[in-house]
Image (spheres, rainbow, N blue to C red):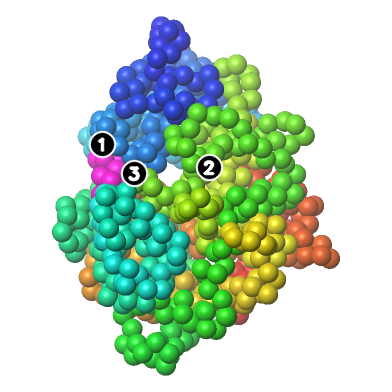
Amino acid sequence: MTDLRASFAASPANPLLDFSALPPFDRIRPEHVAPAVDALLAEAAAALEQVAAPNFPAEWQAIARTLDVATERLGRAWGAVSHLNAVADTPELRAAYNAALPLVTEFWTRLGADERLYAKYKAIDPAALNAEQRQARTNALRDFVLGGAELQGEAKKRFAANQERQAELAQKFSENALDATDTYAYHASEDELAGVPADVRQAARAAAQKDGLGGYKLTLKQPCYLPVMQFASNSALRQRLYRAYVTRASDQAEGEAAQYDNTAIMRELLALRQQEAELLGYANFGQASLAPKMADSPQQVIDFLRQLAARARPYAERDAQDLRDFAARHLKLPGPQAWDWAYIGEQLKQARYAFSEQELKQYFTAPKVLAGLFKIVETLFEVVIRPDAAPLWHPSVEFYRIERGGQLLGQFYLDPSARAGKRGGAWMDDVRARWLRPDNGQLQTPVAHLVCNFADGVDGKPALLTHDDVITLFHEFGHGLHHLLTQVGEHDVSGIGGVEWDAVELPSQFMENFCWEWNVLRHMTAHADTGQPLPRALFDKMISARNYQAGLQTMRQIEFALFDMLLHTRADAGADFQPLLDAVRAEVAVLPAPAFSRTAHTFSHIFAGGYAAGYYSYKWAEVLSADAYAAFEETATPDGLPNVETGRKYRHAILETGGSRPAMESFKAFRGREPTLDALLRHQGMT
């Protein structure tokens, strides 16, 4: 191991082996991946053998100094490669990533199933550990069991092969979803784009000109697709894009996109997950998935979702009837189709509340929104956010540091823009965790990625965000704060580490609430042309529309979550899943989906994103986050500003403790009781 470390020091040419500072993203190339992964795997494997040896002491710090240091280096380097694969995909990088993926997966599977290491952790005296270390050890023992450490012989081999194949399939699922989205383009005429906002038309015209073509290039990327569906008065155009969107990566896709069908991948993944569960002694994957979560059983989750559906259904049915009535009376659409709902919804919103998303969007310029976000975070959590310098992977990426009292707490990258080769959606990932390092005794500060997919500015103007974009930004920043403001020194339970999956959305959804507060929004708006702040009258209209279609939106989330849990608890795991989705829609959906709709085929959360039998977490954690925010409503200052003392209490109880104790303990430390549904239903107007 000493020789390997010496070779790293002598190999500065490979940026993936440079851990002296932040990842050198500007220097990482596909050809660096294989040699770095090989070297780091060799170091980690050597460390595992050293720690697992009979004469190695069963002591927390001794194991950490040897094994955790080596595996953390591997994790950081592979994290950089995975990140670039998600935000800067090229054929060369994809090939390098896919070649290394089985090797990395095999090592982590082998590590998690090593019975010698498992025995070493069991032999550690809990009395010799501090509270953070005890929680980390408890999690580790549980994860060893879930990782197959108690399996023997052929069962252990099958488990390892299963994990490698699942990783391979999840990656291919993600690639197909990305390629199916990137491949599609429709060149529309100017007449077809009647009603589409000017900035969207300008971006589509520029995209066509970049390809050397006339007309307007429409894609399935959200900054293009969504406003077309909301504003285009041409029903045939909406139908064309809708069908392409909901059949992506499926057996219903047409033309070139047909090659990206995910059906077989999904069936095999589901069968492998069932096999994994059975090997571990569970009846189904839903049970195995819930072992490290707050929820006790799949049935508890299913009951929770159905109870929430029963509460929301009357509101959803009222929302749907409003849409049908408006379409018939004002839009001459007596029989609306699936591709009409977004358009009808936007037209009804404008008629009912006298404003449109496009009007509102003009006030949310990206720089001003970011400044407003920073202001509320700085005020509430007593920090300072400053621009910082770091190697970047794209010119649009920004880098910042968070300080308190001049002391560095953490740093983060912000990658806001949609572009080709970048995975859709929004997410937060850790670059490194806060850790009182056992090898040198120094405190390692946390670093995070915050990734969104917003439209770029056009004609030299700053990017404009929809209010939904603003909510997304606040959501991901909430995850970032959970990771960056932690005060825990054990990396496995610091920040988001070790937090139950169905509680990890609490800080993100909590932050969304500030997007509806006048005293926050007024500091983060400036009209793109005039620079004037958001008028109070327009804000009041927006607030009136806050719970517009809340019933329909809730039922849609329940549809996804119920499908996910039922999918992972049925006996015929590898069978056709479309009939189940159809049955869930028949039970839950208020607006019918067409027979050709294949939304499951790009449901990356559960097939490639770690949310398998866990998508319910969004609604589960929303109960926690709404109740937590209610504490700020109860203690607001006379002028309506959030109470800094409440912010300090929230920071100490939730953000700073990370995963060092069960999430329910942290919630009760903040609220003084367990959560209730009341605040969520009240916030969404369903009371």
Quarter of the image where one finds residue 103: top left
Q: Considering only order in the chain, which callout, 1 or 2, is on the residue closer to the N terminus?
A: 1
Q: Is mark 1 on a helix, strand or loop?
A: helix
Q: Nearer the viewer, residue 207 or 300?
A: 207
Q: Nearer the viewer, residue 164 or 381?
A: 381
Q: Is mark 3 on a helix, strand or loop?
A: loop
- The residue that label 3 is drawn on is 421
From which residue to which does the magenta span run?
164-177
- The residue that label 2 is drawn on is 414
Image point 65% across, 71% down: which residue? 539
Outermost residue, right direction?
Answer: 638
The CA distance from mark 2 to mark 1 is 24 Å
Q: Label 1 near label 2: C-beta < 8 Å? A: no
Horizontal side, residue 490 vs residue 648: left or right = left
Q: Is residue 174 magenta?
A: yes
Image point 32% across, 61% down: which residue? 216
Q: Which of 524 and 412 is in front in this view?
A: 524
